[in-house]
Image (cartoon, rainbow, N blue to C red):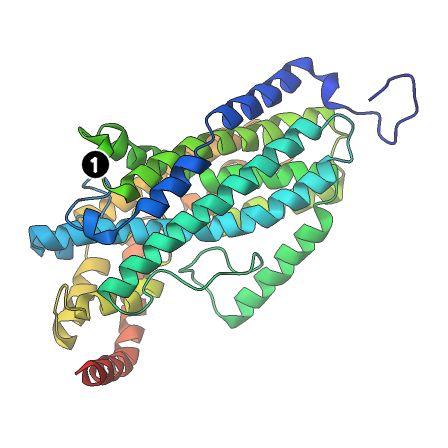
Amino acid sequence: MHRGLEQSLPHSLLDDPQLGKQVALNLKRNRAQDATEAMEAAVAAYRFEDCQHSAWNPEQYALLWGTALWHESSPSQRRLLNQLYWVAYYSQIMSAEIATIFLNQVSAAGLYAVEDFRPICDSLDLETRQERAHIHAFKTIGEDVEHRLFGRRIFTYPMRHPMTETMVFADTNGLRTWWKGIQLRAFTAMAGNPFLGSQYLLIRGLRTLNGKIVQHKLSQYYEHHTDQANAPIPAAISWYHFSDESFHFHTSRLVGVEVPRVLPKPTSFERWVVNQGVAGCQRDHYHFSSAVNGIFWYDPALYRPIYQVLRSPAFGLDHGGAMQMLHRCFCEDSEGVQAAAQTHREAVASYRLFVDSISWLSAGNREMRHMASNNTHRYLRTNRQAYARFKGQAAALERTHNLLQTARA
């Protein structure tokens, strides 16, 4: 902006030279280390036959790791559980990135109205392009695995609208899903406001903070692989994805936490909107999952897909055996349950640290009180109650399974 001419807003990113340098440096480094081409090449070279006999993640990152299923599985079944963790985990990440593509552009539209904010908008444009490559990679491999192994979707889904419920397996119903869609549309309409546009990045940072921790561990499998040239391609994609997301998280921190100091102070209404967004993040991340440690899914919503995995030829359990295994995995304490609860506690601590300096958040949001109120006792009680209800639905699953078996025969 030219200081000698009238401006619509008196604020500029140039008012904080240090912040401006940080934004420019983050954009420069993201451009220099952009993994899009490498990821696209990896997806093009992917063949399930080339990597089906290898783990894709560190051992602990496997579907239902540390539960009865894990302990009683053969080496080949454990390898499959490891691969299915990759499919399930990145199905959730893909859902979040579909929403991110849309909301990045909405926020950029609001922030671009402020003088000299182009570097931030350019960062969001670059990230949007990278997210499209990520989604293509996760969708291509996840769907291929499920088609080969099950002939049906288990954790994947058809392409989603950005206003869809972001959590793939959530504690929800038709009314809650409808109401959440209304809230998302309302926030989208308001995100043209520069402050609220910046605060989308605050909420984005919160929602991806735990993912950053988990994805770093997933990426290390490839990073420390003794033969990277022949490492399984899904592991390489985890590494490329983490490389991009490290910069995305830094953008979230810069824009969500630092940029507001060069914007007008938030109004009471703007503060209320942001607090509602953070409260929504707490609700979404209240649960933890022993099925997919690191994704805060509502495990009772996974009873059906896990049942289908157990009935598949890979595990070959009959109806009674599958139901018994579901109970042992989700309704009894285990190493897997404790590991998932520990990940949840680590997330609460990191979320608190991330928003500690945000003066416009309520004490309940800064302290993550709602999210922190969950524990293993509540988790197991919830799962047991849901299992009692699920037993009534399981007869229909048994009939469907038998019909599919007959059709294939």
Residue, far top: 17
Query: Which residue corresponds to the image point at 23% horizontal and 28% vertical from the top-left?
Result: 224
Nearer the observer, 377 or 143: 143
Query: Which residue corresponds to the image point at 60% horizontal and 36% vertical from the top-left?
Result: 124
Toward which corner of the image does residue 104 lie, by quadrant?
A: top right
Decide if residue 289 is in sight here: no
Q: Is residue 232 above or below residue 77?
A: above
Q: Amino acid at mark 1?
A: Asn
Q: Is residue 116 above or below residue 87?
A: above
Nearer the observer, 44 or 97: 44
Residue 201 in percent (x, y) is at 59, 38
Which residue is labeled 1 in the image?
A: 230
Nearer the observer, 65 or 93: 93
Disc 1: CA contacts within 10 A as few (<14), some (14-19) or many (>=20): few
Query: Which residue corresponds to the image point at 20% horizontal and 42% vertical from the top-left?
Result: 60
Q: Is residue 228 left or right of residue 142?
A: left
Decide if residue 193 is in sight here: yes
Q: Is residue 80 left or right of residue 184?
A: left
Residue 307 in percent (x, y) is at 23, 68
Residue 207 in percent (x, y) is at 48, 42
Q: Is residue 2 left or right of residue 208?
A: right
Quadrant housing the N terminus: top right
Quadrant housing the C terminus: bottom left
Query: Which residue corresponds to the image point at 57% horizontal and 35% vertical from the top-left?
Result: 126
Nearer the observer, 148 or 386: 148
Q: Is residue 276 above or below residue 212?
A: below
Residue 232 in percent (x, y) is at 23, 41
Q: Is residue 155 above or below residue 371?
A: below
Secondary structure beneath disc 1?
Answer: helix
Total label count? Answer: 1
